[in-house]
Amino acid sequence: MAGDRLSPIVNFFAGSRIDRAANSRADDAAMQAHLDHPNRRLVAVWRGRHLMARLGPDRMSVVMTTPDALGLDPDWMDRLPWTFLGLDEAGPLLAVDLGALDDPPIPAATGDAWSFEELRPLAPLLPEGEAALLAQARGMLHWRATHRFCGVCGRPNLPEQGGHRLVCAEGHQHFPRTDPVVIMLVTHGEHALLARGVRFPPNSRVLSALAGFLEPGESAEEAVAREVFEEVGVRVRDVRYHSSQPWPFPGSLMLGFHAEALDRALTIDPHEIVEARWVTRAEVRDHAAQGFDVPGPTAIASQLVQSWLDEG
Ligand SMILES: [Zn+2]
């Protein structure tokens, strides 16, 4: 591990390459200089889809382009929600929400190379730093879209600080939010507990780690213990933090843990869990023959399972 890395594990949707330049958000002159920069570029989102360029059969890239290339009117910054993302080596990057447009703007000259695409199925085809950039853009624009009015007085919210703060006419301030989720691989001796939730896609064969939202007044470790007991009736101890992952569907932070079960008796909550199984490392490695799939590599659950496999 290189000495200057933040941590041994950088999960997918983390590891953004840009400088968020957070110190310049509250500096009006510095922010204006970003917005007036000749190489200011947009990361465009249209109704949850992202403007991407197809580079090959299994390679996509995030399009970072100018307002002119997208055919936006000169007053677009007054009409469309946008937020300052930060700086890459070429200059400032902004996210813009084009959802108010009836059709997504795609320059004719790009042919089929540019298109607005769903992130989830195509994320594995993006460079990791670009997936992280879209996680930031999605999270910020989702927050904007769901906080158009002040939750205190009901007046409209207006953006400040490059879109990183919302303020109403009464002066009530609102800041970007992230919803923390705990995700945990529960083990007992040589077994780990994998489960399929009711919200998994129909016909999915994936078995994954258990997960759930934190509640106010609860530590992450306490949320792990509560969720595991609620979903499968198992008591745990020795809750150990593993790593975290931005999860932009729409705006969560996954906090990954391992935990040790006191025993293997399961009492499954059918409102949450379709199937739960104790599996051995050999069964996970041979999962296709065992009749199940494991989480894909972009999910933190995959890292939790892999680190457990590596221990055995
Ligand atoms: Zn207010």
Image (cartoon, rainbow, N blue to C red):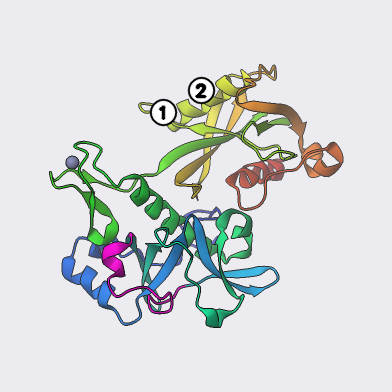
Residue at position x 28%, y 47% in the image? 175
Q: Which residue is label 1 attached to?
A: 215
Quarter-wise, where is residue 242 in the image? top right
Residue closest to the far right:
289
Pointer 2 local density, CA inside 10 Å: few below 14, some 14–19, many at least 20: some
Q: Is residue 12 visible?
A: yes
Q: Quadrant of ligand 1?
A: top left
* Residue type beneath disc 1: Glu
**Relative to 42, is 123 on the left or the right?**
right
Q: Nearer the viewer, mark 1 or mark 2?
A: 1
Picture disc at residue 93: none
Q: Which residue is label 2 attached to?
A: 226
Quarter-wise, where is residue 22 in the image? bottom left
The percent coordinates of residue 212 (x first, y second) are 52, 32
Relative to 247, say whether 154 is above or below.
Answer: above
Q: Main SS type for the magenta part?
A: loop
Q: Magenta segment range?
A: 64-81
N-terminal-most mark, 1 or 2: 1
Residue closest to the far left:
170
**Relative to 254, is 19 on the left or the right?**
left
Image marks 1 and 2: residues in contact by CB distance under 8 Å = yes
Residue 71 shown in magenta: yes
Residue 121 shown in magenta: no
- Which quadrant of the figure contains the N terminus? bottom right
Residue at position x 60%, y 26% in the image? 272
SS label for mark 1: loop
SS label for mark 2: helix
Residue at position x 29%, y 75% in the image? 74
Q: Is residue 189 visible?
A: no
